[in-house]
Amino acid sequence: TLCASIAGPVYYGGWYHFFYQYNPSGSVWEPQIVWGHAVSKDLIHWRHLPPALVPDQWYDIKGVLTGSITVLPDGKVILLYTGNTETFAQVTCLAEPADPSDPLLREWVKHPANPVVFPPPGIGMKDFRDPTTAWFDESDGTWRTIIGSKNDSDHSGIVFSYKTKDFLSYELMPGYMYRGPKGTGEYECIDLYAVGGGRKASDMYNSTAEDVLYVLKESSDDDRHDWYSLGRFDAAANKWTPIDEELELGVGLRYDWGKYYASKSFYDPVKKRRVVWAYVGETDSERADITKGWANLQVTITLPTLKYIDTIVLILHYVLSSLIDIISCTVGFAILGGVDPWCDSHGPVTTVRRALAVRRRSHDVVCLFCCVIKKLITDGSRLWVAVWLSCQKLEIWRTWSAPSLAARSIWYLVNY
């Protein structure tokens, strides 16, 4: 079997629901892809349910692709997804629970009005997918959703915004909500969410100069990585603008530096937090996947928060508290120059927790980790860690202030 893109995480009826791209009959992506479905009470222990959506209509006969779920204030559940037609044209479709009183949401009904959104003029029919969870815009009393695409003239990623009052009739907002740099390619699995109070770049250390920052995230169909950028969103003008022009979406900041793709976030109303999901792709060949009979892993990963480093604004992801005791990364270190192994009075230091790599510029190879390291040094303080992936070298700063050459120690990573 194959599990892939996250399709609609949501909390409903006392259960966390996890939907994902699923091929029940093979370990590679095929047109019969369906929406797998699992539920959990704690995000740790999961119960698999029958597929939620299968390709059985003309508008999704070549695959039920990624989408999102929105729970309205009155409790109504809206599922928007991308359907692949016989010619692989991509259209947006609507489904609703067959029985809203069922907390497990085991059966879904596709709306007879489908498809509800077609690609706009000038956009490739195969380049229009993955509607986001909708949000309510109080200024005009409509719901908004965004969809990723690309401009073929310069191969730039673009984001379209639609508004609706009933989830059946949609109006395309003028222009692009965002257009990425040349060459960024198709924006898949778009995500947009606020990360609370941010500081203006010119007033980075002025705590009174706060406004809301929004994460705009895309999964690049070209390089199969997840990218994000921080910016400001003007709903009335239908514009998202990055706070740093050098960190535009698709060329600046990576969500993660591993085999991590098609991430999607949802708001957890129980613990008042935003949780990000993704799937971890296989590095095996397709032939190896077929031989072993499965491919890819699904992960519940992080809680995104803002962090300020000098004049850089980043989001840092922290592992869910319920996962910390069962997930860690164990590594070994040696001091540069072959001196003693990295130890303290209690023995070798090996356990690294809560780590996420990000980068400052697209041409940099620097990654920053905000992490907690068990017994890292005798006083147990928290440190900044930078990693050069090309040579697997770590630089450790023993301070939260801006790092300086005089304050660091250099280590080589032995077990990566």
Image: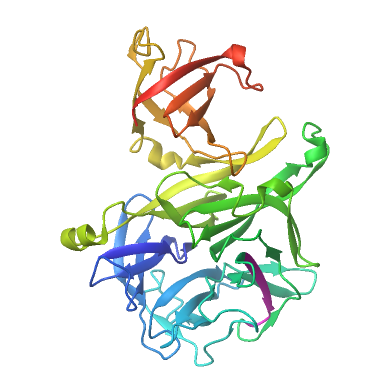
Q: Position of residue 176 (x, y in %)?
A: 71, 70
Q: Is residue 177 above or below residue 411?
A: below
**Which quarter of the image is occupied by the C terminus?**
top left
Dominant SS of magenta comes to strand
Which of 250/305 is in front?
Answer: 250
Which of 153/254 is in front?
Answer: 153
Answer whether residue 171 is visible to the viewer in this image: yes
Q: Position of residue 214 (x, y in %)?
A: 68, 53
In the picture as drawn, the residue positioned furthest to the front comes out as 153
Magenta span of residues: 157-166
Q: Residue at x 73, y 44 (%)?
A: 197
Answer whether residue 18 is visible to the viewer in this image: no
Q: Residue at x 29, y 64 (%)?
A: 2
| Colour scheme in use | rainbow
Q: Residue at x 30, y 61 (%)?
A: 47
Q: Position of residue 193 (x, y in %)?
A: 63, 56
Specify the quadrant of the image occupied by residue 293.
bottom left
**Which quarter of the image is occupied by the N terminus?**
bottom left
- Specify whether 24 is left or right of 158: left
- Check if residue 275 falls in the magenta segment: no
Specify the quadrant of the image occupied by residue 286.
bottom left
Q: Is residue 16 above or below residue 171?
A: above
- Specify whether 9 is left or right of 297: right
- Specify whether 56 is left or right of 84: left
Which of 365/167 is in front?
Answer: 365
